[in-house]
Structures are given as C-alpha cells and as structure tokens.
C-alpha cells in the first residue's frame, strides 16, 4: 500500500475509531446542547405571565353574600 492510500485510510471515518469517536462525541454534544437550549426556550415562551383577574361569584366566598 502506498503512503497516499495509507493517509486516506487513516483519515477515513469508517476505518479509524479515533476519528469516528471524536466526530460522534461532537455530534452528541451539539445535539444535547441544542435539545437543552430548545427546551429552555420553549419553557420560557410558555412561562406564567402573572396573576389573572378572576371573577368569583359572591355566593362561593368564605363569607357568602346571598340576595
């Protein structure tokens, strides 16, 4: 085998576990961070916006007021 063929085989993704494991590590790191950031953004966009004004009937209060 020539030097050029050996260099190509060393840089090939399928033949070198060092290159493939490094690549898969970065892919996994990117996908986990993208998933976490996307989840945080989705939770932030649907956050609780405050106390809504709810009208409570007077007959259901602790001291009910009847007509």
Image (cartoon, rainbow, N blue to C red):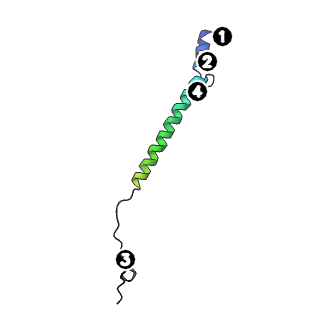
Looking at the rendered image, the disc whose residue lies closer to the viewer, 4 or 3, is 3
Give the farthest residue toward the top. 2
Determine which residue is flagged by label 3: 56
Mark 1 Cα shell of 10 Å, populated few (<14), some (14-19), many (≥20): few
Distance from the alpha carbon under mark 3 to that under mark 2: 75 Å
Residue located at (50% from left, 35% from top): 29
Residue located at (51% from left, 31% from top): 26
Q: Is residue 2 above or below residue 23?
A: above
SS at circle 4: helix
SS at circle 1: loop
Marker disc for residue 20: 4
Q: Position of residue 8 (x, y in %)?
A: 59, 17
Distance from the alpha carbon under mark 2 to that under mark 1: 10 Å
Dots 3, 2 in contact, CB < 8 A: no
Q: Earlier in the sequence, mark 2 or mark 1?
A: 1
Determine which residue is flagged by label 1: 1
Quarter occupied by residue 58: bottom left
Residue located at (34% from left, 85% from top): 65
SS at circle 3: loop
Distance from the alpha carbon under mark 4 to that under mark 1: 22 Å
Residue located at (61% from left, 18% from top): 9
Q: Position of residue 33 (x, y in %)?
A: 47, 39
Give the farthest residue toward the right. 1
Q: Position of residue 21 (x, y in %)?
A: 57, 28
Marker disc for residue 9: 2
Q: Earlier in the sequence, mark 2 or mark 4?
A: 2
Q: Is residue 23 above or below residue 58?
A: above
Distance from the alpha carbon under mark 4 to that under mark 3: 63 Å
Marker disc for residue 29: none
Dots 2, 4 in contact, CB < 8 A: no
Dots 2, 1 in contact, CB < 8 A: yes
């Amino acid at each position: 085998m020539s030097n050029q063929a050996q260099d190509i085989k060393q840089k090939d993704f399928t033949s070198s576990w060092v290159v493939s494991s490094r690549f898969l590590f970065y892919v996994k790191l990117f996908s986990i961070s993208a998933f976490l950031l996307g989840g945080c953004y989705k939770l932030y966009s649907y956050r609780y916006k405050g106390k809504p004004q709810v009208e409570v009937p007077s007959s259901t209060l602790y001291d009910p007021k009847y007509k």
